[in-house]
Image (cartoon, helix red, strand yellow):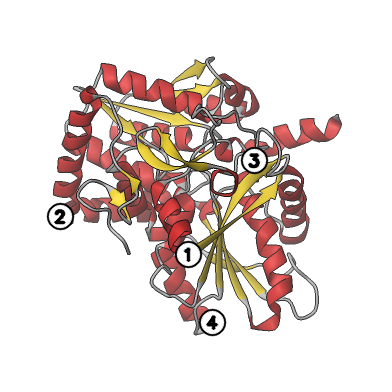
Amino acid sequence: MHRPDARGYFGGAFGGKFVPEVLYEALAELERGMDAAFADPTFWNEYHALLRDFVGRPSPLMEATRLVEEAGAAKVLFKREDLNHTGAHKINNTVGQGLLARRMGKGRIIAETGAGQHGVATATIGAKLGIPVDVYMGALDVERQSLNVFVMKLLGAQVHSVTSGTQTLKDATNEAFREWAARVEDTFYVIGSVVGAHPYPFMVREFQKVIGIEARAQVLERYGRLPTDVVACVGGGSNAMGIFSGFIDDLDVRLWGVEAAGHGLDAGDTAASLNAGSIGILHGSRSYLLQTPEGQVSNTHSISAGLDYPGVGPEHAFLKESGRATYVSATDEEALRAYHRCAEREGIVPALESAHALAHAQKLARELGGKGLVLVNLSGRGDKDTRQVAALEER
C-alpha cells in the first residue's frame, strides 16, 4: 500500500493541500489528531468493535450464480457492503471519523452527501455518539433521494438543501467547505470519499480498507486462490479504494474502476473524470476532473447521485497513471440494465452506483471464461433508488 508523502501527494503528483489559510491550520490539526489516533491501539479496538457490533461486519462474500449464465463464463463474487447497517460502505468511514471527532473534542459534525448514503451514515454515527450533525445536499439530490433525506432527519440531523450551481454533490461539497471554514474551532467535517485535501484521501482509505482485507481473506478461504479481477464503481472513489487495498500488492490481480459515463463519454455532461477529464485542482487536491478549456469545473450528469461528481480521489489518479488500475465507464442505460438483471437474477436490488460496476463485471465474466474469478464490490443497496427508477420508467 502507498502512503502519501509528507506534502500529501500520491506518487509525488496527485493530492496536496490547495485550501485557504483558515483551512490549512484546520487540516494540520486534523492530521495531528489522525496520526495520534492511528498510533493508539485503543482507538482501533473501539473502531473494530463498532464495526462488529453496530455495523455488522464482516460483510459476507456471495457467489452470484445467475447473474451471468452463459456456459463457460467466469464466476462472479459479490462483496456484500449493501448488508452493512445503513445499507452501504459509507458507514465504515463515518464510524472512524466520528470517533476521531469525539477524540478531538469537536462538538459538531458536518458532512456533504450526494446519494444520501454518506449523509445517513454520518447522521447515524452522530446519533450513536451523541454529536449533532448538519448535512449539506444539493437540491436536485434532495428531490431524487427524498427517502434518505427523511431518514437523516429521523436520525436527528439537520439537512441543508443547496440551491447553487448544478444543485448536486459538487455544490454540496462547496457549501460544506464554506461552513467548515466559518466554524473550524468546534466543527469536524466528515468527508465521504477519498477526495479533498490531505489527509482526507489517506484517512478515508484507511477506514475503508477493511473491505479489501476481509474480501481477500474470504476469497482465499473459499476458493484457495485470489480473484483474477476486482471491480468497483468510482465517483470520488472510496468503495473502490477500500476493496482495491486488499489486492493492490497482488500484481496478478487486475483492478477495475467503473465511472459513470452518463449519456456517454462524448456527451457534454458525463461524470467520468478519469476517462474524459484532465488534471487540475478541485476541493483542495490535484487530480483528474471534468473542466472547461478555461479551467472552470464542468457540469456533470449521472443517473446515480453518488457518482455525479466532477472529480476523483488523487490516489485513483495515481493508480491510473502508474497503470496499476484500469478505469472504464458505464452509461446510464448500461447501469439500468445491470440494476434490473441483478434484481431479477440474484434477488438483490443494488444501488445504481453498484450497478455501474455490475455492468462491467458481466462483460469481464463473459470475456475471461472459466478460469476467471471476478470480485465485485456491491457497495450499497438500491432501495434509495427505486422511486427514481420507477419514475424514469413511467415516462
**Which callout, 2 or 4, points at the residue further toward the start of the chain?**
2
Residue topped by disc 4: 223
Q: Position of residue 18 (x, y in %)?
A: 30, 33
Q: Which mark is residue 323?
A: 1
Figure check: 89 above or below 152:
below
For label 1, the SS is: loop
Q: CA distance from mark 2 to mark 1?
A: 32 Å
Q: Amino acid at mark 3?
A: Asp
* 128 relative position to 336: left or right: left
Q: Position of residue 174 (x, y in %)?
A: 42, 24
Q: Which mark is residue 290?
A: none
Q: Residues within 10 Å of mark 3 (few under 14, many from 20)?
A: some
Figure check: 50 above or below 161:
below
Q: Nearer the viewer, residue 142 or 233?
A: 233
Q: Position of residue 86 (x, y in %)?
A: 49, 42
Give the label, 1 or 4, closer to the camera.
1
